[in-house]
Image (tube, rainbow, N blue to C red):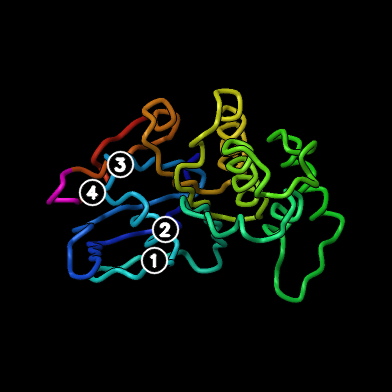
Amino acid sequence: MVGAEVLTAEHVAFRYAGVPVLRDVNLRVAAASTVAVTGANGSGKSTLLHLLAGVEQPAEGSVRRRAGCRLALLPQRTSGIDALPLTVAECVQIGRFRPRHRLGRDDRAAVSMIMERLDLAHLARRRLRELSGGQRQRTLVAQALVQAADIYVLDEPTVALDATSRQHVHDLLAERVRAGAAVVYASHDAADAALADRTVRLTGAVDRSVSDDAVLRGP
């Protein structure tokens, strides 16, 4: 059952170096629901997710998150992380780190579970720079999903994944939604987007706007 709104964008606009990227974005995301953001390359999908996550601030309008809601972000461009001497297990564990908090039994269990579910356990001691594209993507998805978040904002979470791994990711997302979380993810894949409760589409090279009722799915 869809819950109360946890994330809202109202009349949001964004510009890079004065060039319009998004205009008049209106989007409402409820707990226990999934929203897929689609659109052509360069339409502003990543920018919209960064605005929702608070990484970027809108030039106009507002983005509001319900008080007390924890947010986990999976950005699309994370190439810099490869330079760090991290193993797969260490990278996933980062998702459980909190200030003044040491990893406990529950944290280790959550890390172990997500690594098993995403077929990463046998890669636990492998360095990130040694991974294939699909293995690296599964590791970063695991880092995001291992967090005990109320809102998951994921940029192309299934890119570079085979069909089996894509299904595992969507199974995990469905579990998070059943537990009450909200999930917003960008995708260029129609089949991936079709799994969401609702799809919004960024359209147009000039008028890059999105409406909350751009495309509706479900009952």
Q: CA distance from mark 4 to mark 3?
A: 7 Å
Q: Quadrant of residue 97?
A: bottom right
Front-most of 95 and 82? Answer: 82
Q: Amino acid at mark 2?
A: Leu
Please rate how many residues cluster around mark 2, counting C-alpha atoms within 10 Å: few if below 14, some from 14 to 19, many from 20: many
Q: Amino acid at mark 4?
A: Val
Circle 2: element type: strand
**Would you say the residues marked 4 and 3 are in contact, meaning their CB atoms lie under 8 Å apart?**
yes
Q: Amino acid at mark 3?
A: Val
Residue 82 percent coordinates (x, y):
61, 55
Q: Is residue 29 magenta?
A: no
According to the image, label 1 marks what residue?
64
Q: Which residues are magenta?
A: 204-208
**Would you say the residues marked 1 and 2 are in contact, meaning their CB atoms lie under 8 Å apart?**
yes
According to the image, label 2 marks what residue?
7
Q: Amino acid at mark 1?
A: Arg
Residue 10 percent coordinates (x, y):
27, 61
Q: Earlier in the sequence, mark 4 or mark 1?
A: 1
For this orientation, the residue located farthest to the right is 105
Q: CA distance from mark 4 to mark 2?
A: 15 Å
- Of marks 3 and 2, the one in the foreground: 3
According to the image, label 3 marks what residue?
200
According to the image, label 4 marks what residue?
210
Q: Earlier in the sequence, mark 3 or mark 1?
A: 1
Q: CA distance from mark 3 to mark 2?
A: 15 Å
Please rate how many residues cluster around mark 3, counting C-alpha atoms within 10 Å: few if below 14, some from 14 to 19, many from 20: many
Residue at the spot x=26%, y=55% of the render?
26
Q: CA distance from mark 3 to mark 1?
A: 18 Å
Residue 86 percent coordinates (x, y):
72, 57
Residue 77 left/right relative to 167:
left
Q: Earlier in the sequence, mark 4 or mark 2?
A: 2
What secondary structure predominates along the stretch shown in magenta?
loop
